[in-house]
Amino acid sequence: MLIHKSHSKTDLIDLINLLELPIVFSHQDNKKNIQDKLNDLLITNFKIKENYYNIENKGLLKSYLLNHNPKKILTTKEKNNVMNIAKYIIQYAKSNYCLEGSKYNSYQEIEDDMHYIKQFGDIPSVRRCCRLLNLDMSFTDKMFKPLISPQVQNELEEKKVQKIIKYDYKLKVRHATKEEPIILYFD
């Protein structure tokens, strides 16, 4: 079986780890070696862990690997175009949502660009554009919600949890004695 070329080595490794497939690999293995190991595995019987790709059996895994990688929907040229549009919208937002300080001539142009780029919500700049434009009073009747893949959504939630855990600081006041420090806890 030929695995689609849009799946990178990192994508294949992440998929193997996520599905907990019984494949032993080294990070020194190249993409071809990992593809060969995946092809060998697809001949045998194995169990697939529940996942956010909704791959439940061997047939769905084969179709996922044969088709274009859903994470790689943009070519480099298209991604550069999306990034440029995002920069223009961020510039509009930074100029206090004033059309004169941006390249746009009307609010309709901004709205059209936002409807085009919001489908690429896996790109952080697009998520930032949506967040900034939702604060604009000119678009109070519209909410721009970026489309985010389940994998990126899962990563964002993990980062949010880690951020909450990270802020568990204790403050010591320097004028207290060493034997009896004053400790303040922030909840």
Image: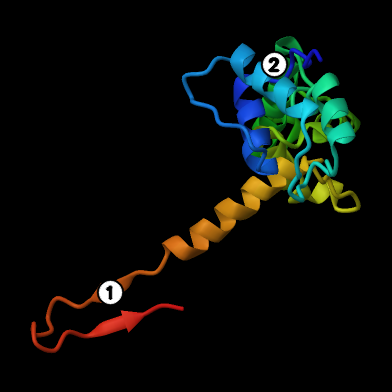
Looking at this view, name the residue that lies furthest to the front.
44
Check the picture and name the quadrant holding the N terminus: top right
Q: Which mark is residue 80?
A: 2
Residue beneath label 1, please?
171
Sequence-wise first label, 2 or 1: 2
Q: Position of residue 84 (x, y in %)?
A: 69, 20
Q: Position of residue 75 (x, y in %)?
A: 75, 13
Residue 96 seen in this snapshot: no
* Three-letter residue code for mark 1: Leu
User: Callout 2: 10 Å neighbours few (<14), some, many (20+)?
Assistant: few
Give residue 65's position: percent from left, percent from top.
Answer: 80, 24
Label 2's element?
Answer: helix
In the image, which disc is placed on residue 98? none
Q: Amino acid at mark 2?
A: Asn
Of 135 and 22, nearer the camera is 22
Residue located at (68% from left, 34% from top): 15
Left or right side of 100 for 17: left
As helix, strand or loop, the secondary structure at mark 1 comes to strand
Label 2 to label 1: alpha-carbon separation: 46 Å
Q: Is residue 49 above or below residue 23?
A: below
Residue at 77%, 19% (x, y): give it. 74
